[in-house]
Image (cartoon, grey):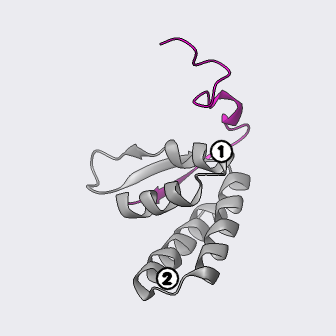
Amino acid sequence: MTGFAGGESDLRRFIPRGKEVNWGVDAEQRAVLLEATEELPALRAVIRRARIVDDIPGLLWIRATVEELDELYTLVEELTDWTRSRKRRELLDDLRATLCTSIDGF
């Protein structure tokens, strides 16, 4: 592949610096976050790090710094404020809960 370095698909500048923690999401949550971060490349890079967990069907692990997760938490709060759908609000509430767990280390 040529033309990758320095281009829009080059996410090297978003490689996490510092200690990372795990955060688990499912495919539906990941899809919502990918949509919400379309114009936020630093946060989109975090979501794109999701990896399948072989021994837990449906779970995707994201390795991120606490600072990155804190930024995602703020985004999820903003999305919740704008959401009218009860189903989507529940999904966002679940994301906030799992983000808190990962940020706090419990």
Q: How many C-alpha atoms fall within 10 Å of the one at disc 1: few (<14), some, or many (≥20)?
A: some
Asked if 83 appears above or below 49 in the picture, the reply is below
Residue 98 in percent (x, y) is at 52, 68
Query: Which residue is depicted at the point 58% across and 61% down?
Result: 102
SS class, disc 2 = helix
Rounded to the nearest whole Å, what is the CA distance between mark 1 and mark 2?
24 Å
Query: Which residue is depicted at the point 69% across and 54% down?
Result: 66
Stretch in magenta: 1-26
Query: Which residue is depicted at the point 53% across and 11% down?
Result: 2
Residue 31 in percent (x, y) is at 43, 58
Q: How many C-alpha atoms fall within 10 Å of the one at disc 2: few (<14), some, or many (≥20)?
A: some
Residue receiving disc 2: 89
For the residue pair 39 and 65, the one nearer the viewer reads as: 39
- State which quadrant residue 15 falls in: top right
Query: Which residue is depicted at the point 71% across and 31% down?
Result: 13
SS class, disc 1 = helix
Asked if 5 appears above or below 47 in the picture, the reply is above
- Indicate left or right for 90 with 6 as reference: left
Name the kind of residue labelled 2 in the image: Arg
- State which quadrant residue 58 falls in: bottom left
Residue 19 included in the magenta stretch of the image: yes
Residue 91 in percent (x, y) is at 45, 75
- Indicate left or right for 32 with 83 as reference: left
